Amino acid sequence: MSGASAASTALLTDRYELTMVQAALADGTASRRSVFELFTRRLPNGRRYGVVSGTGRLLEAITAFRFGDDELDYLRSGNVVDAQTLDFLANYRFTGDIYGYAEGEVFFPGSPLLVVESSFAEGVILETLALSILNYDSAVASAASRMTSAAGSRPCLEMGGRRAHEWAAVAAARAAIVAGFTGTSNLEAGRRYDLPTIGTAAHSFTLLHDDEASAFAAQVASYGPDTTLLVDTYDIAEGVRRAIDAAGTGLDSVRLDSGDLGVVAREVREQLDSLGAAGTKIVVSSDLDEYAIASLAVAPVDSYGVGTSVVTGSGAPTCGMVYKLVLREGGSGQMEPVEKASSSKTSVGGRKSAARRLDAAGRASEELVVAGAQGDWVPEDEDLRPLHVPLVRDGVVEAGYTGAEGVRRAAARHAAARAELAPSARRLSKGDPAVPTTHVTL
């Protein structure tokens, strides 16, 4: 393939992004200095906080946002844009600045999650890319955070790849790890982001063999007792007995994937203990979500395998994020705030920054959104923790936010940010945002 490689992200966008650029080039406004802001007007019904995820993936995608020969040929053959615009796109490189909430940070309605400063043409063309990545990844991370919160110290394992688009599954695995999951079944996510991978056998492996004992013996012969045996293909009690017969009392764990998990887990725990396998752990799966995990809090369960619910945002598959122009250079050359006044879809003009107020105990008590802030704004009050970090400067991505390092940093940031929230923020019942937001203008 000539020109840009197959990994180009330039066409992961909507047609009107390019047609706006064409019209702006024609009338001379394409180069006007502009500030775009990405935010959400509300959280999913009753949720108390959201989690920023996908920032590292977005930065990687912006780096690959290049129009090579193949992309330009497609646009030319379809008469999508004119020759002047094709020339502009052929040389497109984002040269502006991007600030945002660090990946893993929690957010609330109106939080200025991403601020893009550039020419109009450079910034507007990134709208769809930014929204598609951050809306999905943040939805997964927001759901995953509720699950890891409900699980407490018990690990959550992501295994939802078969319930999502094949590449969405990779993004979902990454986002789940950001929000506290400890492993994923997805090998591409493991390879790409150096994530721990998990998985041993499905029911089909047991059904392949003439009997359950043969299946367990084969698995143990390959992996030793440090494996997980799925014991509910037939009779669970018999499955547990055969598992210990095959692996001995040093068997790492058994997995339960059906039935009333709370009741069955207690029965299996008693049976394992009676067989001398007190150290054998119990892993449960089967359509778990945060509510099911919470209901198993007092059950003798050691870890949770979560699939469909985590990769679909547990009922909220998008965060409703929008990307709006909030400040632009006017005809006089001065920067002027602009805002949308449409009913129920308003925006607030002006470049914004944000900080979180912490009380004496280190608990978040207020989200402060400041209009009129510039660049690396630092609040004067010592009890305010600034939330924006520089992500891109003069078109160059800051180090530490992409790849495996970016995921590790994001997971640490989320753990710290969630710890700042009051215990009430972790309730699964419907409620208001955990922290009130105050808007001020400098």
Image: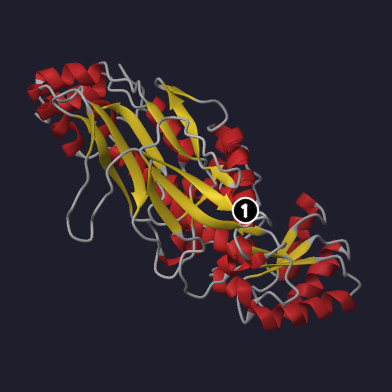
Total number of numbered discs in the rendering:
1
Residue that protrudes farthest toward the right in the picture: 276
297 displayed left or right of 372? right
Q: Is residue 167 above or below residue 220?
A: above
Q: Residue at x 83, y 62 (%)?
A: 251
The colour scheme of the drawn protein is secondary structure
159 displayed left or right of 317? right
Q: Is any part of residue 164 visible from this angle?
A: no
Q: Residue at x 17, y 29 (%)?
A: 330
Residue 334 placement (x, y as % from top left): 22, 26
Residue pointed to by mark 1: 180
Type of amino acid under label 1: Gly
385 displayed left or right of 393? right
Q: Is residue 50 above or below residue 26?
A: below
Nearer to the camera, 373 or 322: 373
Nearer to the camera, 69 or 94: 94
Residue 328 placement (x, y as % from top left): 23, 32
**Location of the C terminus (image quadrant):** top left
- Helix, strand or loop status at disc 1: loop
Residue 183 placement (x, y as % from top left): 64, 51
* Quadrant housing residue 188: top right
* Quadrant housing residue 37: top left
Nearer to the camera, 8 or 29: 29
Q: Is any part of residue 386 visible from this angle?
A: yes
**Location of the N terminus (image quadrant):** top left
Residue 49 placement (x, y as % from top left): 49, 60
* Quadrant housing residue 64: top left
394 displayed left or right of 23? right
Q: Residue at x 69, y 64 (%)?
A: 152
